[in-house]
Amino acid sequence: MTSPRDATTDRPRLAVLGAGTMGHGIAQVAAMAGYETRLFDVLPEALEAARKQIESNLRKGIQRGKVTREESDRALEALSFTRYLSEAADGVQIVIEAVPERLDLKRKVLRRCAEAAAEGAMLATNTSSLSISRIAEGLPSPERVIGLHFFNPVHIMALVEIVRGVETSDETVAQARDVAERLGKTPIVIADSPGFASSRLGLALGLEAIRMVEEGVASPEDIDTAMVLGYRHPMGPLKLGDLVGLDVRLDIARYLYESLRSPIFEPPALLERMVAEGRLGRKSGRGFYRWDED
Ligand code: NAD
């Protein structure tokens, strides 16, 4: 078995699977934290786009005085890109999967990593909605499987939700905590349940705000101002919904309503109507706000 540390640099090895929105960001923070980081994707163009995005993030970091040139150089040196999963996973201690949100795909890539990675390697998934226990089902070592839920953009957002499946071991939770902290994030640990902590609470507030608009309690602007000035939220729940995309919010509401069977998550008729009319928020130019000039 290959040593889990890189022989030439003595850096611990980490593989990120999927070089999209989340994968490139996770690879960036891992490389900056000193991991020998391998970023894997099936599409060469995704790897190329990830490399460009990471370089651009680092350049902006230098311009803003958040990153030194030496840190940027070291991070780029610690990063490698590959189209071969076996090459990415070979001998790594840590795997973080960020492939598309499909149970079969996540199981498939993690199974292949479980075989190629170092003994006792942590197999983390960045799923935003799938059950960790279900992803771990049928894998050779389900006790090593855990959720590491990052937020977008990864190099800026400080939170990581550590999600423990029914079979996840205490050692794996401790390892996940250590990795998250080393990546400069603040971890919270939660049980495997729909919406984890952040989506469940965030959506409860967002849907109630929509019901208040529906009932004519106040305007979207005034409801948002209530939370911004009254509770010091950086942004109101309706504006946030516009930014995330109201179609995305509706999908999550349906999923949570179905899985938690709580009326809190019943999709408000107004939300259904806005999505049906193509009022999706910023991406379509109109949601609760107008985004024309954007
Ligand atoms: P994305 O579509 O931007 O990226 C997915 C990448 O995976 C693509 O580059 C694609 O080429 C690659 N891919 C597809 N099949 C693959 C395979 N078999 N092996 C390796 N790579 C493969 O997706 P994303 O937004 O980065 O989401 C990835 C995961 O992170 C999902 O599970 C998602 O739910 C979760 N997540 C997303 C966000 C977000 O804000 N986008 C936030 C938290 C969690």
Image (cartoon, rainbow, N blue to C red):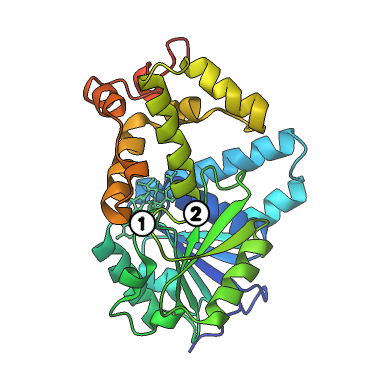
> Could you say where residue 176 lies in the image, as x and y percent from the top left?
57, 70
Residue denoted by label 2: 197
**Mark 1 CB lies closer than 8 A to ligand 1:** yes
Query: Label 2 is placed on what type of residue?
Result: Ala
Residue denoted by label 1: 99
**Mark 2 CB lies closer than 8 A to ligand 1:** no
> Could you say where residue 8 lies in the image, as x and y percent from the top left?
65, 76
214 relative position to 184: left or right = left
- For label 1, the SS is loop
89 relative position to 31: left or right = left
* Up/down of 254 relative to 241, above or below: below
Q: Residue at x 45, y 56 (%)?
A: 196
On residue 219, the disc is none
Q: Residue at x 49, y 25 (%)?
A: 239
> Could you say where residue 84 lies in the image, as x and y percent from the top left?
36, 66
Q: Residues within 10 Å of mark 1 (few under 14, many from 20)?
A: many
Image-quadrant location for residue 61: top right
